[in-house]
Image (spheres, grey):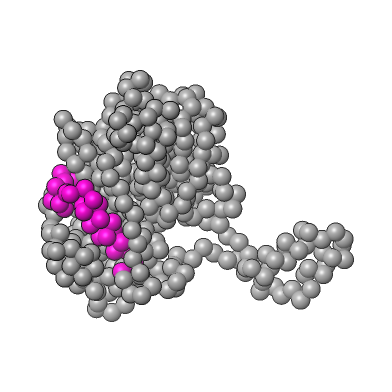
């Protein structure tokens, strides 16, 4: 194991990412599983960086919507690739922050000298949801399976009613509140007075920028055609304010409802992965470094008691800035996950609010505004989609490539998650 020199921490190199195209649920990947997609994303990293048959220190990956059979998902996925089977896999889940959190965990181990390299990844499908029976019938099946005689098996079904066979579908809502993420975000939009027109404009810009990025070849090294898809199938290059303005609201009714299918991310299937390493490991293999992971932070808000469900990234970013001594304006690029256009706009408004920054973040003044021309420069989740656990790795791989193309600079990542959490990170590239 390589130890940090002089008792310090080593730099965390981001070598680069790879992903499969993201596709709307129940479309091209309707027959694919999390294991299929995650294996493909990992293999993309293996192929891109010449890791065939190599033993890595670890793969950290996960999925949010998963089956019980996926309990060892990371390990099973890497065993489906051409990586050495001696590579350990760690399955992780932190809602939409899963793969970014995986990168932070790998990065911390690289910095401290515990490991030399690792892949952070995530996969999600809502086309293949885990459909189960209700608890009562499930318990009957368990008792029947443990029975030692036909009489005991029959006894397990005593009092059975056909209604018990009704399947239990995954709920798209917060267990603590019973509200969906969209309903929570609708409340945030009202609280921060974010008009629909601004949400639609952000959505339109995301689609246009993502479409241009594909046309320019930016995504060529990052996105590997797979499963019948060559590019993300949610992108609408002809998106316009007129088209978006004609959509009905979906998470609320009345004049104050603003969230539509157009300014919210669609349910999406897909997977993404990113390779991190020490500089020595990368140099020994002739792999250039795209950027460095220099800071990370995870935070949470009390959304059960009326804090905005998706406002935790405001806290995570504020804490990163305090710990690094950076200001919000010290970045050349901002990658803010577009769970909903309203979430991004609420976050920007909160950072500009002196009352919020003083009262909630404990700061002396507002963090201020950012240059919107530096925000999600190649589009983000509203356009490309959001397979929950894959988004963090997608964003990190994208931002690292943006910084490599720029030659130098600093980028900020902000990802909101279910459960009122947020994950943030800082990437840098020095000339």
Q: Is residue 326 magenta?
A: yes
Q: Is residue 150 left or right of residue 336?
A: right
Number of numbered markers: 0
Q: Is residue 247 above or below residue 407?
A: below
- The answer to whether residue 395 is above or below residue 348 is above
Residue 29 percent coordinates (x, y): 46, 46
In this rendering, position of residue 341 left or right of residue 75: left
Q: Position of residue 229 (x, y in %)?
A: 40, 40
Screen quadrant of the N terminus:
top left
Q: Nearer the viewer, residue 267 or 398?
A: 398
Is residue 57 positioned above or below 28 on the image?
Answer: above
Quadrant, the C terminus:
top left
Q: Which residues are magenta?
A: 308-334
Question: Is residue 214 shown above or below 237?
Answer: above
For this view, does 326 lie left or right of residue 136?
Answer: left
Residue 87 shows up from this direction: yes
State yes or no: residue 430 in magenta.
no
Front-lying residue, 79 or 59 = 59
- The residue sitting at 33% across, 24% down in the picture is 280
Report the front residue among 161 and 2.
Answer: 2
Q: Residue at x 21, y 52 (%)?
A: 321
Residue at 40% over, 68% down: 180
Picture residue at 40% right of the left edge, 30% below the top: 116
Question: Within the image, what quadrant is residue 179 found in?
Answer: bottom left
| Residue 63 coordinates in the image, percent (x, y) | 47, 50
């Amino acid at each position: 194991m390589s130890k940090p020199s002089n008792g310090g921490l080593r730099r965390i190199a981001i070598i680069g990412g790879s992903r499969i195209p993201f596709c709307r649920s129940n479309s091209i990947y309707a027959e694919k599983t999390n294991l299929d997609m995650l294996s493909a994303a990992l293999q993309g990293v293996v192929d891109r960086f010449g890791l065939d048959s190599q033993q890595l220190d670890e793969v950290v990956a996960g999925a949010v919507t998963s089956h019980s059979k996926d309990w060892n998902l990371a390990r099973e996925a890497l065993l489906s690739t051409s990586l050495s089977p001696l590579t350990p896999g760690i399955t992780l889940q932190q809602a939409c922050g899963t793969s970014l959190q995986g990168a932070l965990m790998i990065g911390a181990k690289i910095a401290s000298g515990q490991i030399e390299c690792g892949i952070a990844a995530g996969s999600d499908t809502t086309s293949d949801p885990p459909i189960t029976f209700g608890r009562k019938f499930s318990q009957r099946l368990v008792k029947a399976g443990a029975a030692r005689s036909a009489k005991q098996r029959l006894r397990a079904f005593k009092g059975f009613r056909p209604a018990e066979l009704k399947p239990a579908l995954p709920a798209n809502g917060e267990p603590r509140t019973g509200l969906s993420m969209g309903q929570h975000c609708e409340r945030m939009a009202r609280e921060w007075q974010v008009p629909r027109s601004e949400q639609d404009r952000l959505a339109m810009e995301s689609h246009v920028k993502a479409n241009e990025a594909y046309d320019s070849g930016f995504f060529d090294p990052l996105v590997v055609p797979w499963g019948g898809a060559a590019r993300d199938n949610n992108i609408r290059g002809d998106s316009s304010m007129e088209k978006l303005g004609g959509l009905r609201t979906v998470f609320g009714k009345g004049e104050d409802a603003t969230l539509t299918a157009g300014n919210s991310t669609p349910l999406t299937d897909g997977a993404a992965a990113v390779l991190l390493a020490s500089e020595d490991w990368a140099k020994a293999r002739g792999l250039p470094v795209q950027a460095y992971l220099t800071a990370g932070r995870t935070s949470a808000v009390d959304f059960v008691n009326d804090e905005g469900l998706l406002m935790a990234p405001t806290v995570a970013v504020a804490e990163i800035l305090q710990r690094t001594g950076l200001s919000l304006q010290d970045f050349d690029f901002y990658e803010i996950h577009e769970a909903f256009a309203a979430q991004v706009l609420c976050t920007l408004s909160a950072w500009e609010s002196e009352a919020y920054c003083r009262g909630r973040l404990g700061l002396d003044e507002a963090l201020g505004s950012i240059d919107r021309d530096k925000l999600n420069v190649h589009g983000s989740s509203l356009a490309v989609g959001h397979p929950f656990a894959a988004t963090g790795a997608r964003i990190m791989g994208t931002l690292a490539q943006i910084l490599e193309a720029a030659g130098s600079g600093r980028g900020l990542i902000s990802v909101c998650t279910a459960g009122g959490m947020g994950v943030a990170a800082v990437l840098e590239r020095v000339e």
